[in-house]
Image (cartoon, grey):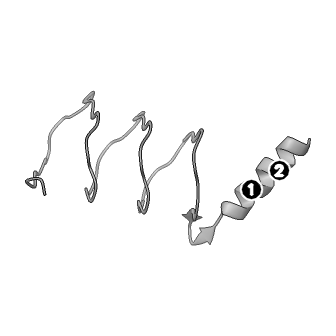
Amino acid sequence: MAESRRFEDQDLAGVLFEDCSLADSVFENVDLTQSVYSNANLARARFTNVNMTEVTIEDANIQGLTILGYDIQALIGAEVARRLAG
């Protein structure tokens, strides 16, 4: 296991994390505005008290997505089917 590191009150804007493991990390009171996640594994990630304004999710495998306590996987499936039929 890697040595635990702690970053507090630091400006890490513009940093590139490539082929890195951030598993079991905690992001608290952070600004991730315009961050890009590509080929990222967010399995079992939990987002609490977050602002998700103008968020785009493309080419994603979504299973068991719960928002505000609602499992919305069926809603996404129904909307995709509606658009494909139209």
Count of all numbered marks drawn on residues in the image: 2
Quarter of the picture containing the N terminus is bottom left
- Whole-percent x, y for residue 82 in the image: 86, 49
List the single residue furthest toward the left.
3
Closest to the observer, 65 or 10 = 65
Image-quadrant location for residue 55: top right
Q: Which residue carries the number 1 mark?
A: 77
Q: Mark 1 belongs to which amino acid? A: Gly
List the single residue furthest toward the right.
86
17 shown above or below 72: above
Quarter of the picture containing the C terminus is top right
Q: Mark 2 belongs to which amino acid? A: Ala
Q: Which residue carries the number 2 mark?
A: 81
- Whole-percent x, y for residue 33 in the image: 40, 37
List the single residue furthest toward the top.
14
Regarding mark 1 in the picture, which secondary structure is present there? Answer: helix
Crowding near the residue tagged with mark 2, few <14, some 14–19, many ≥20 C-alpha atoms within 10 Å: few
State left or right for residue 3 relative to residue 18: left
At x 27%, y 60%, the residue is 24
**Is there a contact, CB below 8 Å, between mark 2 and mark 1?**
yes
Closest to the observer, 60 or 46 = 60
At x 79%, y 57%, the residue is 78
